[in-house]
Image (cartoon, rainbow, N blue to C red):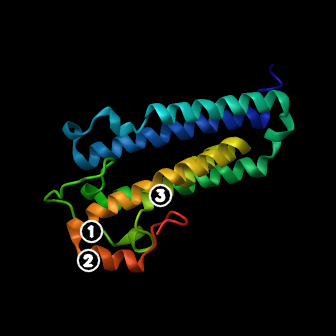
Amino acid sequence: MIEIFSDTRLRQLTRMFLAIIFFHTSEYILAIAIHGASKVTLSSLLITKHYALAMLISILEYLIEIVLFPGLKQHWWVSNFGLLMIVLGEIIRKTAIITAGRSFTHLIKIRREEHHTLVTEGVYQIMRHPSYSGFLVWSVGTQVMLCNPVSAIAFAVVVWRFFAERIPYEEHYLKQFFGRQYVEYAQRVPSGVPFVN
């Protein structure tokens, strides 16, 4: 059993847990810093039943493959590329949150609030939904880092599909809030999620 959890494999699991802890803790801290502690709940940790199940299944895949196909987990360059994806995803997402400030919330707003402004500077000059793009890169990166081929594909498909449905819904309200200004912005700046206009 000690051989199974040695070298790269133990490092992969440690990095995975650290990535998850950092992601959720930093999301929560940023929410408090931006919106104030009185307006932030534990839901700002972004841990849902579906998310927890997906992470549990990915760890199960990792443990099964480490026993049945131990060589699969020894591709350090794949694992390090996944770590790079995690870091890049974090940078993109956290930059988006900080740039948007009070205009960023974890829940889609269906009513415009007084402080809600259309953010088009910084990372929003490059993509309309950088926080979604960052999360997509981060989540797939966690699975690439673990050398989990099944979960990497599943995470890419499921997270992409979630945002492919969420973006049009959110943009419906953004068009109501900001009118022509948002329409023109959307015409010149891509969503940031591949194949989602």
C-alpha separation, residue under disc 3 versus residue under disc 1: 17 Å
Residue 105 horizontal/vertical position (percent): 30, 50
- Report the residue at 20% width, 61% height from top: 116
Secondary structure under tag 3 reads: helix
- Disc 2 crowd rating (10 Å Cα; few below 14, some 14-19, many 20+) is few
C-alpha separation, residue under disc 2 versus residue under disc 1: 8 Å
Q: Amino acid at mark 3?
A: Ala
Of residues 172 and 155, the one drawn nearer to the viewer in this rendering: 172
Judged left or right of residue 32, residue 49 is right
Residue 194 horizontal/vertical position (percent): 55, 65
Q: Earlier in the sequence, mark 2 or mark 1?
A: 1
Secondary structure under tag 1 reads: helix
Which residue was labeled with disc 1? 175
Task: Count how many numbered circles sit on residues in the image.
Answer: 3
Mark 2 or mark 3, whichever is nearer to me: 3
Which residue was labeled with disc 3? 164
Q: Earlier in the sequence, mark 3 or mark 1?
A: 3
Judged left or right of residue 52, residue 111 is left
The N terminus sits in image quarter: top right
The part of the image, by quadrant, that contains residue 66 is top right
Residue 98 horizontal/vertical position (percent): 35, 57
